[in-house]
Amino acid sequence: MKTEELTGKHDALAVLKLKDFRLFLSFRFFMTIAAQMQSIIVGWQVYELTHDPLSLGLIGLAEALPFISVALYAGHIADRFNRKKIILWFDFLFLFASGLLLLITYHKTGIIGKFGVLPIYLCVAISGIARAFLYPATIALMAQVVPRSLYTNSSTWNSTTWHIAAITGPAIGGLVYGFFGVKVAYITVIISMLISVVLLSIIRSRPVPAIDEKETLMQRLSNGIRFVFSNQLLLGAMALDMFAVLFGGAVAMLPVFAAEVLKVGPEGLGLLRAAPMVGAVLMSVVLAYRPPVVRAGRLLMIGVAGFGLSIICFALSTNFFLSMGLLALSGMFDNISVVIRSATMQLVTPDEMRGRVASVNSIFIGSSNEIGSFESGVAAKLMGLIPSVIFGGMMTLGIVGVTAKWAPKLRRLNLNKISNVPFDKLREHNGG
């Protein structure tokens, strides 16, 4: 038995003692700040130009379609080549998209005056391609930086860092946009991404996982999909989060809530965008010291259900501070599922398949944010802003019930029991 099992003690800071993991967290912190700032800047800029909720939904669609189209191939690349180099290449692609947005803004009268917001959507599409390659390579690199025994611990601190950055990014983006204008805001995005590149370059490169050279590209892609769909724990956790985010997300409509319901402007929008992340960080601290391992499946269901209820209450609020509190509560519940899903994926996936499994996860989870934005825009157009968000929260509650019935192994998940089980035994145990 492990020492912590005999003594009952848990070292919440264990993974932070690893230098490369600290560098990894710092790199991801600034990369996330850049992405979050760009997201809020683009959203407010497009809404200022169009005053149409559907145009906000189209931002999500513009990123999701190219993301989905290359995601599986991106996972193959992450399993085939050096993961650190992949991240560097596509960090620069993201920088290229940010530079184009800055250029479009500088020549606003000519470019936007002639083509409308279409050039902005094209830049968002480039960012979507970059993000599709960044996600599986980043997740796979993290698993190489830390030992298997610390996967749950690393997932918690990775989630904490991401959410702190996701607080900082929208707050900085909204404040810089509000006080200094959109051009300075895009310059800030570029600076943050450059810092992340420098930090990543310091991390020691890890070897490329051994692969079967006889496998064709299609065989490798299909093996990754088959691995996920044959594993009830992975498939159940991914599907639960995908549909919850697809129907339960109100983030895409926050510019409308900020402008028309709460009347707080871009500065207030930045705070609203940051509120779920504040809640998530608070929950991350709790989970670092009390990891959700023994009743992980039950906690996962409770977290997603709580997220749906928080979104329903947010839709009904007309008070800015109450709305911020409800969004923070939604972030607390959401982070429970994020940590459990991430730890489960790390524990049951062999190293040579991490990129492909992460890419399938990115289609389930990552693209659902953007498609969810599109769904939110269409629903708001057809049903009205507030009824559409209430409908989404109610759908989330229904999805929890269906998943609990359909995936009993996920409902009974105990991360302690699988942390030391070999991968071949996990495949037998967790099959659908």
Image (spheres, rainbow, N blue to C red):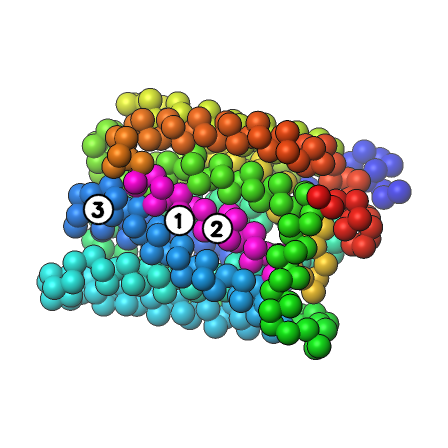
CB atoms at circles 2 and 1 under 8 Å apart? yes
Q: Secondary structure at mark 2?
A: helix
Query: Which span is picked out in magenta?
Result: 355-378
Q: Relative to the observer, which residue lies in front, 5 or 419?
A: 419
Question: Between tags 3 and 2, which lies in front?
Answer: 2
**What percent of the width, then of the height, locates residue 147?**
74, 56
Kindly report the secondary structure that dominates the magenta region of the rendered protein.
helix
Label disc, if present, on residue 47 of the rendered structure:
3
Mark 3 / mark 2, whichever is N-terminal: 3
Where does the image place residue 86, in percent across and percent down from the top left? Answer: 53, 70
Asked if residue 382 is positioned above or below residue 150 in the image, the reply reads above
Q: Residue at x 46, y 40 (%)?
A: 245
Up-down relation of residue 319 to residue 183 (above or below): above
Q: Amino acid at mark 2?
A: Gly
Q: Name the residue located 51 percent from the left edge and 53 percent from the top edge.
A: 363
Tell me if label 3 and label 1 are in contact, CB under 8 Å: no
Q: Which mark is residue 366?
A: 2
Q: Which residue is mark 1?
A: 370
Q: Amino acid at mark 1?
A: Glu
Q: Secondary structure at mark 3?
A: helix
User: In the image, is residue 3 above or below residue 98?
Assistant: above
Q: Is residue 192 left or right of residue 72?
A: left
Q: Residues within 10 Å of mark 1 (few under 14, many from 20)?
A: many
Task: Say whether residue 343 is left or right of residue 33.
Answer: right
Task: Judge depth for marks 3 and 1 and give the one in front.
Answer: 1
Secondary structure at numbered mark 1 = helix
Foreground: 288 or 334?
Answer: 334
Total labels drawn: 3
Q: CA distance from mark 2 to mark 1?
A: 7 Å
Q: From mark 3 to mark 2, how far is it between C-alphas?
A: 23 Å
Disc 3 marks a residue whose amino acid type is: Tyr
